[in-house]
Image: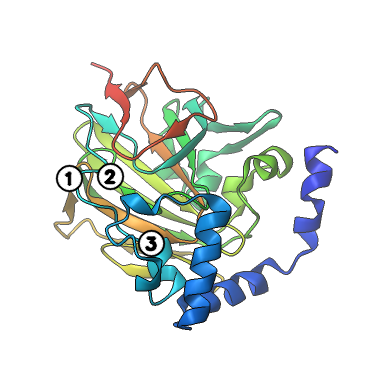
């Protein structure tokens, strides 16, 4: 079966309704029912609870608490590198931005302008730069950390669809990451601006940042934009900057002549937060 045929049912599913339902269940404190669901989830996806700060499945009052669980101190040491992986997951794609085009999968690309919600001036700062698309599977740790130190400039919530973001869907849905709902976080770093785009997906109940809290819901159906340039919101490399309540994808954008990727990187390679992502191009 072709990837396009495999994703056809997703066009027909009531994705928004399913996401609202999943979000309500994930937030519910249902006692033994919640514990049973978490226990099933851990077994089904092979979640490594030994790394969790609280390894006791019964110790989580809601599925959201379990899903956004913190890790034990020291299990994700930071590499000595200019840029480190911000998440646990797998490399979907990475490489050069060709003028304004980001490679998604064979036969598919999308523009930086579309990804950041239509702001051509913001997107121009990443022309001929570099990108990395990192996929978080259900078993992964779902907090997102800073790849390098940065000062927060702006956040944009872009409404959109809620397709799955798994590899099959990435191959089958054109412009997937610029079609799905997303939160664009723009920072100023030592070597220029960079953006971290948190992409929603089917049953991703919400996305949150450490400076704002839960961004969605609400879902008002129009673009929302917050400017933080007048505030002193600085984050160190490795600091938590956000989290997914149910899993998804992070797309990172960097300017031209900034990032040289780790030579060990390859599509579909598993990654862990804190590993070396790359070095600054001197």
Mark sitting earlier along the chain (1/2) = 2
Front-lying residue, 228 or 44: 44
On screen, residue 180 versus residue 133, left or right, reads: right
- Residue 275 sits above or below residue 225 on the image: above
The residues bearing labels 3 and 1 have C-alpha atoms spaced at a distance of: 21 Å
- Which residue in the structure is indicated by mark 3? 68
Residue sitting farthest toward the bottom: 30
- Which residue in the structure is indicated by mark 2? 146
Q: Give percent across and percent down for residue 195.
A: 37, 43
Picture quarter with the N terminus: top right
Q: How is the image coloured?
A: rainbow
Q: Is residue 200 visible?
A: no
Q: Residue at x 65, y 55 (%)?
A: 163
Q: What label sits on residue 236 in the rendered view?
A: 1
**Picture quadrant of residue 102:** top right
On screen, residue 250 versus residue 59, left or right, reads: right
Q: Is residue 83 visible?
A: yes
């Amino acid at each position: 079966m072709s990837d396009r045929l495999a994703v056809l049912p997703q066009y027909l599913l009531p994705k928004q309704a399913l996401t609202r339902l999943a979000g309500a269940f994930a937030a519910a404190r249902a006692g033994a029912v919640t514990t049973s669901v978490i226990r099933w989830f851990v077994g089904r996806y092979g979640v490594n609870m030994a790394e969790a700060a609280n390894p006791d499945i019964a110790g989580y009052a809601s599925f959201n608490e379990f899903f956004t669980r913190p890790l034990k101190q020291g299990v994700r040491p930071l590499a000595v590198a200019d840029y480190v992986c911000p998440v646990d997951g797998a490399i979907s794609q990475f490489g050069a931005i060709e003028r304004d085009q980001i490679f998604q999968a064979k036969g598919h690309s999308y523009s930086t302008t579309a990804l950041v919600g239509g702001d051509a001036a913001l997107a121009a700062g990443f022309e001929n730069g570099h990108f990395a698309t990192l996929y978080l599977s259900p078993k992964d740790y779902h907090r997102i950390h800073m790849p390098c130190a940065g000062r927060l400039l702006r956040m944009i919530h872009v409404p959109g669809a809620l397709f799955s973001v798994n590899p099959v869907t990435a191959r089958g849905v054109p412009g997937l990451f610029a079609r799905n709902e997303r939160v664009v976080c723009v920072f100023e770093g030592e070597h220029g601006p960079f953006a971290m785009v948190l992409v929603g997906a089917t049953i991703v109940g919400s996305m949150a940042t450490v400076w704002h809290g839960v961004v969605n819901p609400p879902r008002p159906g129009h673009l929302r934009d917050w400017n933080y340039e007048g505030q002193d919101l600085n984050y160190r490399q490795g600091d938590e900057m956000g989290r997914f309540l149910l899993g998804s994808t992070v797309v990172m954008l960097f300017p031209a002549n900034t990032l040289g990727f780790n030579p060990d990187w390859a599509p579909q390679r598993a990654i862990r937060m804190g590993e070396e992502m790359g070095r600054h191009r001197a």
